[in-house]
Image: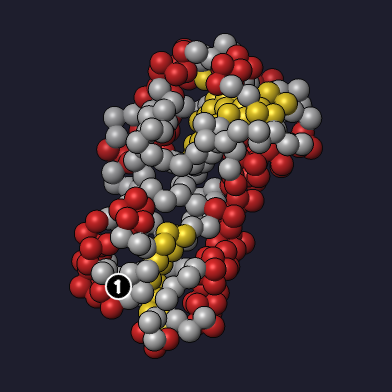
Amino acid sequence: MHQMNKKILIADHLHPIFKEEAEKLGFECHDMPLITKEETLKIIRDYTGIAIRTKFLIDREVIDAGNNLKFIARAGAGMDNIDEEYAVSKGIYCINAPEGNRDAVGEHVIGMLLSLLNKLRNGDQQIRNGVWDREANRGFELKGKTVALIGYGNNGRSLAQKLSGFEVDVIAYDKYKTSFSDQYAREVSMEEIVKHADILSYHIPLSRETRQLFNEEYLFHFKKPIILLNASRGEIVNTKAVIDGLKNGKILATGLDVLEVEKFPALSEQPWFKELIENDKVILSPHVAGWSVESYRKISEVLGEKLKRLEIS
């Protein structure tokens, strides 16, 4: 392929460092962050690569229209908005950047956890409303608790590393890894997770296998009431099961950066939404755990580095 024919469609808001790095490699970059899926379908055949965050699905329709595509770059960790299997079957490389936002995720989850343990949100709201109640806002210490991680990839390990100063016992289960125990976490079976967990945090991708993984039946097996944290994908956790768990005491509190349905107005139309936002044991954030000021740049740097390693003829 001639250098002049190597073109990348940047179909989302990416840090300019990705474009800079790609241009150094001889790519011509068309920065079109506002482009729609329909518009993309009309022009994608002209491109060697497409870079995207979460704006639309890179499904069979897009992949088939992009018959000159050599790679798809996902500016983030998860690949659930890309039909990766189909892309790979067409000889298209799929690259992502979980290394770029793992620190952001680890720190955000700790922020949520400490906020829940110390009732920071409730205390703050009470003071703003003229209430001074020390007893109701007595916190719990993280020290001595068992934190159970489901998934020990970039994000899971980052959280474990950041927890290392808190004198907690970190255990981890990963269906796709073995012998991954290190100084930050101990590899255990799912039986040990449900037996020992005080805090449960998800760090796995969304797939057919993990969708609705956390449900009522799954929660039933936990021996102790838990604090539930999810900064992976919303569809992994059944929200109704969380609300029921909060009601019956199986869940002490929950920090959710991701939800089964995201963005308004769709979110406010969910049958569980009102109960979720009215519960003072819940803390929510708008899918931003991995989206820090620093990770915005780091993600694009990682993609630039991976682009250098691709063998695009």
Residue 118: quadrant of the picture: top right
Packing grade of label 1 (10 A; few <14, some 14-19, many >=20) is some
Q: Is residue 15 visible?
A: no
Pick whichever, 22 or 281, lies toward us.
Answer: 22
Classify residue 69 as left or right of residue 131: left
Residue that carries the numbered disc 1 in the rendered image: 68
Classify residue 110 as left or right of residue 299: right
On the image, the x and y values in percent for residue 52 come to: 40, 63
On the image, the x and y values in percent for residue 58 come to: 31, 58
Give the residue at x 69% y 20%: 135
On the image, the x and y values in percent for residue 34 come to: 33, 70
Q: Relative to 57, say whether 238 is above or below.
A: above
Quadrant of the image for the C terminus? bottom left
Q: Relative to 95, say whether 49 is above or below.
A: below
Q: What is the three-letter code of the residue carrying label 1?
A: Asn
Pick whichever, 29 or 290, lies toward us.
Answer: 29
Give the residue at x 28% y 78%: 46
Q: Is residue 183 visible?
A: yes
Q: Relative to 76, say whether 177 is above or below.
A: above
On the image, the x and y values in percent for residue 184 come to: 73, 36
Give the residue at x 44% y 18%: 218
Residue 169: quadrant of the picture: top right
Q: Relative to 82, say whether 220 is above or below.
A: above
